[in-house]
Amino acid sequence: MATNARPGRRRRRQAWTPVPGARVRLRGRGPSYTLAVDTGTVEEPDPVNPGYYFVRLDEPATYYRADGTTEPLPVIREADDNLLPLADRPE
């Protein structure tokens, strides 16, 4: 069967759908912030950008403003393919 898709051009399909309350690990980092920890909790899907979710970090990231100052960033918006589900752990 022929296909028009080129190798390496397909977007990896998410094996699970993030839901509010899900514990996740973030892959990578953003260009304008540094993560203190790479774990957090999904708050909600982004209503404007499908496939993106707001994640409340376990510790705020540091956001680097254009004027050289920094500020804490407790919630970030992240693409679903950058979120890895964490198994529930007893506390």
Image: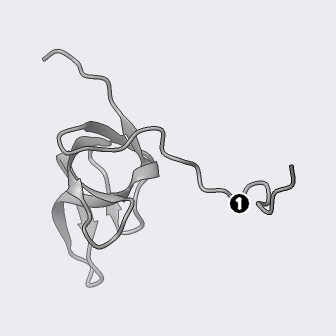
* Above or below, comparing residue 48 to residue 29 in the picture: below
- Residue at the spot 29% in from the left edge and 73% down from the top edge: 48
Q: Relative to residue 12, is residue 70 drawn left or right?
A: left
Q: Relative to residue 6, is residue 36 drawn left or right?
A: left
- Residue at the spot 60% in from the left edge and 56% down from the top edge: 11
- Residue at the spot 42% in from the left edge and 67% down from the top edge: 31
Q: Relative to residue 79, is residue 22 drawn left or right?
A: left
* Above or below, comparing residue 13 to residue 4 in the picture: above
Looking at this view, name the residue that lies furthest to the front. Answer: 1
* Residue 79 in sight from this viewpoint: yes
Query: Which quadrant does the C terminus fall into?
Result: top left
Looking at this view, name the residue that lies furthest to the top. Answer: 90
Q: Position of residue 34 (x, y in %)?
A: 33, 57
Q: Position of residue 51 (x, y in %)?
A: 39, 59
Depth order, front residue of 27/63: 27
Picture colour scheme: one colour
Q: Position of residue 85 (x, y in %)?
A: 36, 34
Looking at this view, name the residue that lies furthest to the right. Answer: 2
The three-letter amino acid code for the residue at tag 1 is: Arg
* Above or below, comparing residue 81 to residue 67 in the picture: above
- Under circle 1, the secondary element is loop
Depth order, front residue of 71/83: 83
Looking at this view, name the residue that lies furthest to the left. Answer: 91
Give the residue pinned by disc 1: 9
* Above or below, comparing residue 24 to residue 4 in the picture: above
